[in-house]
Amino acid sequence: MVRSLALAHGQDVTDTLAAVGHEFAAATAVTRVDEAPDGTVTYATEVHDGWDIGGVANGGYLLALVGRALVEFTGRPPLTVTGHYLKPGLPGPANVTVTPVRLGRRLATVTASLRRGDDELIRVLATCGAASDEPAVLVDGAPPALPPYEACAPTPRGDEPPFPGLNDRLANRLRPGDDGFRTGAVSGRAELAGWFAFADEAPIDEVALLLAADAFAPPIFNLTGAPGWVPTVELTVHVRARPAPGPLRARFHTHFVDGGLLSEDAELWDSTGHLVAQSRQLALTPRP
Amino acid sequence: MVRSLALAHGQDVTDTLAAVGHEFAAATAVTRVDEAPDGTVTYATEVHDGWDIGGVANGGYLLALVGRALVEFTGRPPLTVTGHYLKPGLPGPANVTVTPVRLGRRLATVTASLRRGDDELIRVLATCGAASDEPAVLVDGAPPALPPYEACAPTPRGDEPPFPGLNDRLANRLRPGDDGFRTGAVSGRAELAGWFAFADEAPIDEVALLLAADAFAPPIFNLTGAPGWVPTVELTVHVRARPAPGPLRARFHTHFVDGGLLSEDAELWDSTGHLVAQSRQLALTPRP
């Protein structure tokens, strides 16, 4: 059973980039340990156990781990973050290096790398900086229509194989029918929508959006009915705003599966109906 | 007047990565000049005049210039390429450095940088490697409906201000009505579709897709009717296949304009109706 989740209305999120005391903050904590002459800063961190899919750290979690270092380094929220996935992330001590590319007044571009021992897990290229207060000029899209959070079924816990450990940390809930890939009653559409939330009700900051963009089952599962390993080659997240308190509405969609590759697009909307992130990844087609 | 364009049916494209003798090949030529102990290879090149918008090199052209070096370095076509734009690209001698990240059997991940004098113009993170021969499993989308190439109006030449120099190199043709931003009779939709082709009928290889993904006017112009400078922060292109001969069908769409930022999605389809590239960029909203 997933813990009940109270909507975090009224919660103070002005400094949730720290969000101390919550599991996600702890699992993405970074400590500055060194600065090289070229400006590269090394942060000690850890790939935490329990944010995994079958023992391998979730790709969104790894991107968020780097994202925390990006925020520490630039003093700004992530704006557009691209990660290329190099090796499966196993739990253990790790480090993130961040190297400046161009630190401007509004935008700061950096590269970063997450390494565990001799293994580089992901390489990242990112530009950080907050969106302005300018109001929306065009919103050609809408949050997915979902029953209220409480009316959607909890996601099975990670201690019930084959469900990932990630499910223990999150309290995501899928739109009724979109969990067909678990039972074999697939919708026949490569789409999946639902609510994103942390199991411990942690506020969802900009860094958490990097996790959320990869924290649901691949929508292709609802087309093929054949869950398997879908290795991400590259994931890009555009962070468009800090979310208002409360669970996010998420919609994942795969449009093109061809040549052994698939794209996966996601939109994340906050509780006020504001688009807070868009993402796209390129992945290899599922392997059993 | 744009030169008439014969469809390149039957043209041999098995080795168009070189495509010697065509303007695009010349404008993206790179020459290996150095290799550092860490494996970084430096290529001499030139930001060629005439691939510009108002004197500043088109962002897709700059990405293609780097793309050519990626192909030289990895011996593989680009698969997913992300560029972060740092400074406006003025014409002149330049160099591209390519640094290996992980060179695997199927995929090769590298970083690259385009520099002109002391200015770094773009930083790139890319994975190269060809799609497999596996057939399409899902195509949830279709090429835009367009009149035949010959029935669409030529794009005004670059020597007719204020039209960009890029128009001299390309023979793009917009869907009737999608050129409303030029006359003030905008469609009211942030969408734009048309044909992409080179003016000299050069074959369109994988590297040219990096150009094509940014080679049309921003679709936001058809919403706001207010052309201006739309600086790209980041552009990611997924190359899904080498195009069959002939002009491409392209569709550009902006869904979200908010917080001083806009996203722009593109799909490129070849003459056989095959999706050959998908792209998304994050840009600052137009400045007059």
Image: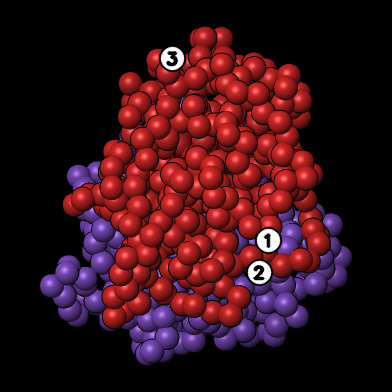
Chain colours: A purple, B red
Q: Are marks 2 and 1 in contact (CB under 8 Å)?
A: yes
For label 1, the SS is strand
Q: Quadrant of the N terminus of chain B?
A: top right
Residue where numbered disc 2 is placed:
A284
Task: Tell me where residue B173 appears, x and y as whole percent.
Answer: 62, 25
Residue where numbered disc 3 is placed:
B160
Could you say which quadrant of the image residue A190 lies in? Answer: bottom right
**Which chain is indicated by disc 2?**
A
Q: Nearer the viewer, mark 1 or mark 3?
A: 3
Question: Which label belongs to residue A262?
Answer: 1
Which is more toward the observer, A201 or A194? A194
Residue type, mark 3 in image:
Glu
User: Which residue is at a point 84% across and 57% down the rendered structure image?
Assistant: A188
For label 2, the SS is strand
User: Which residue is at a point 28% across and 47% down the rendered structure image?
Assistant: B93
Residue situated furthest right in the rendering: A185
Residue type, mark 1 in image:
Leu
Left or right, A239 with reference to B153: left
- Are marks 2 and 1 in one subunit? yes
Task: Tell me where residue B50 appears, x and y as whole percent.
Answer: 40, 32
